[in-house]
Amino acid sequence: MNNKGFTLIELLISITLLSLLMFTGNYVYSQLASRWDKELGQFDKTAQRAQSLNWLQHALQGVEPYIVRNKQKKPVFLFIGANTSLLASTKRGIISDKYPEFFRISALENENRKFDLVYQAISTKDLLLLTSDQEIEFSHRLTLLTDLDEVRFSYFGWADLAAKTSLDPAIKPAWFSRYSGIDNLITPEKIKLTLVKNGQELNLFSILDINANDWYKHYIEVGF
């Protein structure tokens, strides 16, 4: 009868091999877990970015003519479009799906010398805006996108209301880097928002009411 068991050397070799297998398995698991966390985090960032772009497009497509009075008490449009910011009214806001809202989209430089795209808004339910110089205290602030290389607004439309109603065929709408409904007495027909990140460019387009001057004529006729 053979009662021979494991020798000490065999036992040490077995323990060493088992330790190697456990170490290898743990290393592979940690690598897979790290990769999964990284991919999951990237997915979350991508999903958040897609949602922010959808919100942004939704708000821009809802921009509508909104009449206020200037310092001379004459009706003008609440629309102040600059190269890196836009102040207007939208019927498709981000903070509420029941009421239109006044909003401002701004490109703000951050500590990385990049730009964050910030959306500020207040519902028309909470603010009655009557004049062009009335102060707007926004109740909501949301950072939509971060670390952008460039943010650029462009506006397509007539130079002013006089150009829109002119019979001169040589006068045509064009693209502008700035557009004021207060000065022009009309709103643009299109908005283009250009976003650049890591060398990649994305353009968002919005087509607005091309008959905004009818709103202006209405308020003139009723003596607003």
Image: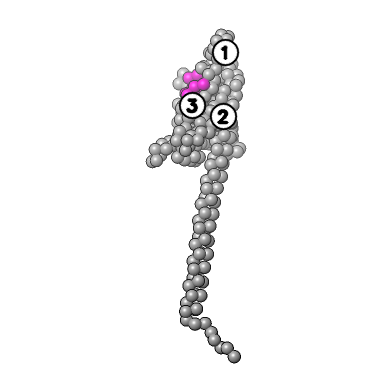
In this view, 153 is above or below 6: above
For residue 81, the mark is: 3
Amino acid on which disc 1 is placed: Thr
Q: Give the label, 1 or 2, closer to the camera.
A: 2
> Which residue occupies the foreground of this view, 66 or 79?
79
Report helix, strand or loop for mark 1.
helix
Task: Report if residue 137 is visible in the image.
Answer: no
Task: Please give the name of the residue rendered at 50% of the width and 64% of the height, measured from the top-left corner.
Answer: 24
The crowd level at tag 2 (other Cα within 10 Å; few <14, some 14-19, many 20+) is some
Q: Nearer the viewer, mark 3 or mark 2?
A: 2
> Mark number for residue 165?
1
CA distance separating discs 3 and 2: 14 Å
Secondary structure category for the residue under label 3: strand
- The image position of residue 158, as x and y in percent, is 54, 18
Q: Considering only vertical position in the picture, is 212 above or below 51?
A: above
From the viewer's perspective, is residue 139 above or below residue 40? above
Give whichever of discs 3 and 2 has the lower sequence position. 3
Nearest the viewer among 115 and 76 is 115
Residue 181 colored in magenta in the image: yes
Q: Which residues are magenta?
A: 175-184
Q: Quadrant of the N terminus?
A: bottom right
Give the image location of residue 135, x and y in percent. Answer: 45, 31
From this viewpoint, which residue is outermost toward the top? 168
Q: Which residue is mark 2?
A: 205
Residues under numbered marks 1 and 2 in contact, where contact means CB atoms less than 8 Å apart? no
User: Residue at coordinates 57% horizontally, 88% vertically from top-left?
Assistant: 2
**Left or right: 143 as drawn, with respect to 206:** left
